[in-house]
Amino acid sequence: MADKPVVIGVAGGTGSGKTTVTRSIYQHFVDKTILMIEQDYYYKDQSHLPLKERLNTNYDHPLAFDNDLLLEHLNDLIDRKPVKKPVYDYKLHTRSDEVVHVEPKDVIILEGILVLEDQRLRDMMDIKVFVDTDADIRIIRRMMRDIKERGRSIESVIEQYENVVRPMHLQFVEPTKRYADIIIPEGGQNLVAIDLMTTKVRSILEERSIM
Ligand code: C5P
């Protein structure tokens, strides 16, 4: 069997730049096979609930995620087995009927607001990263994205931010910074941090004779 893939966890608040960091690492490994897993795709299936109830769900609480399924898939990918990754619909607030067939790869990046919150997930990671960006920048990014891509209004974004996203961030997301090996200020703009990360990933790949 081939050696164990390198698993990198990238956490951080909403709008912190997790995806930009993940993409920057990805670009450094065009020569390698690398896989991105979004924790958001593993929100619990809520298709049995009416839309009104789905709208009122707290999506920033650890219990909103189906981490059991995520763990099962990560274990399979680490064992070099393919998985059927769920797809999430932010407009309908539930899992869609689609699944994506995902092949195992040498590097797996697991990205999401609460990937460092669950010890079982942390234990699977070789490198734990927290992207640390000021709250004012994060809310501006969140507002633009949710209106453009997730079918939300300004009012709904502000209401959700004040009542749910901010308190949950302070209670659950921010404290996971303590588990990070690397804290990256200002996410994807931080080229030095991205460079250090990629060097570390390469050295683990070499140690495991994957490169
Ligand atoms: O991409 P990002 O890290 O911002 O995604 C996490 C955010 O998605 C959470 O802060 C949560 O409030 C939001 N979310 C949402 N509606 C859903 C599912 C997640 O607004 N149905």
Image (tube, rainbow, N blue to C red):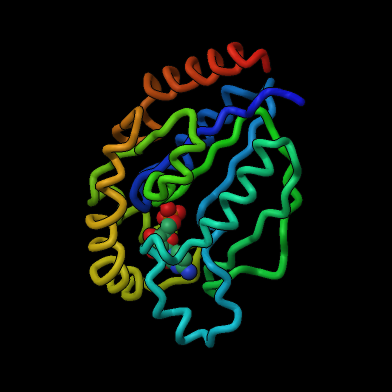
Q: Quadrant of residue 191?
A: top left
- Percent coordinates x, y for residue 201 in the rendering: 53, 20
Can you say which quadrant of the picture contains the C terminus? top right
Q: Height in image: 184 above or below 171?
A: above
* Residue 144 in sight here: yes
Between residues 35 and 64, which one lies in front from this camera angle? 64
Which residue occupies 23% across, 51% down? 136
Between residues 117 and 29, which one lies in front from this camera angle? 117
Q: Height in image: 66 above or below 106?
A: below
- Percent coordinates x, y for residue 207 in the rendering: 58, 12
- Percent coordinates x, y for residue 183 in the rendering: 31, 31
* Residue 147 in sight here: no
Which residue occupies 48% across, 44% down? 121
Residue 50 horizontal side relative to residue 96, left or right: left
Between residues 126 and 134, which one lies in front from this camera angle? 126
- Percent coordinates x, y for residue 102 in the rendering: 73, 46
Indicate which quadrant contains ligand 1.
bottom left
